[in-house]
Image (tube, grey):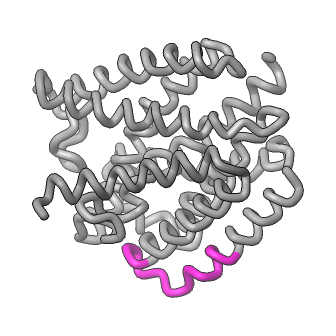
Amino acid sequence: MNETLTRALSGGVYVALLIFCTLFSSMSFHILFTIFMCLSIYEFSKMTNFKYPYIFAILGILLSIAIYISKSNPFNFIYLSLGSVIFNLMLLNNLFKNVPFSKYHKTINHLFLYITIPFILLLLLPNFKNPSEHKIIISIFIMIWCNDTFAYLVGKTIGKNKLMERISPKKTIEGFIGGVVFTILSSIIISYFYTFFSVTLWVVTALLISIFGTLGDLIESKFKREAGIKDSGTIMPGHGGILDRLDSVIFVTPFIYIFYLIYFNYVS
């Protein structure tokens, strides 16, 4: 089987599994993303040589179960979301200053604030609507896929100016702008089908995804460069590891979460 077909089949299974489990039931959604969280913790611990990943995997599983049983209010997790956002901003500061991540951040913080908590916040995003609306998750992934696809296509077609060549040589400023434009367009289309959010809310979500999703991809690329590896894992033939597929969503989720907290508390 050639590499292109392998990549297509692997990606198709991943997308189908994600959409089916997210929309089938709240339980299947929690199970799938809890599994994704544990796999990401495992891949990240291997990448950073952390010896006790099971501690954070167990903590994440317990939090996931608690959220599922209690149908937790997202506003109860404001401090965890703020902690994750602040940590991500520290990572961005070091990314732009070209400071090694290992110099100022311990692996224990990476696993908890960079991996575990974003997955927990992702599980809580549907609860911003009552009853829970899991189409929020599908919409976020559609916008992330749209951003990645059109950033690649526009960058490959007209891209000349490198975005951050020392981290990701193929990313261009033109591609980034193309990704932003088409992701916003996709959010407007989504707003016609999923009217439980306003057009404004969808468009701002698209902007956050375009900006912080791209930065999240660069963050994980820097982690992999420091570890001297190409992919975080091998579970998805042709794509790498689960963390390679979810690096954008786990980085952008805390920012979306904080925005929704502000919006639903002070605007709506």
Q: In which quarter of the image is the C terminus?
A: top right
Name the image quarter holding residue 229: bottom left
Q: Where is residue 183 in the image (x, y as percent from the top left)?
A: 41, 23
Q: Is residue 66 left or right of residue 3?
A: right
Q: Position of residue 156 (x, y in %)?
A: 13, 31
Q: What stretch is highlighted in magenta?
A: 46-58
Is residue 54 part of the magenta span, yes or no?
Answer: yes
Callout count: 0
Q: Where is residue 193 in the image (x, y as percent from the top left)?
A: 59, 18
- In this view, the residue farthest toward the right is 70
Is residue 239 part of the magenta span, yes or no?
Answer: no
- Above or below, comparing residue 244 to residue 19 in the picture: below
- Above or below, comparing residue 104 to residue 208 in the picture: below
**Chief secondary structure of the magenta portion:** helix
- Above or below, comparing residue 216 to residue 235 in the picture: above
Q: Where is residue 81 in the image (x, y as percent from the top left)?
A: 69, 47
Name the image quarter holding residue 85: top right
Going 49% across and 24% down the picture, which residue do you hit? Answer: 207
Q: In this view, does 127 lie to the left or right of 19?
A: right
Q: Nearer the viewer, residue 154 or 22?
A: 22
Q: Is residue 10 left or right of residue 256?
A: left
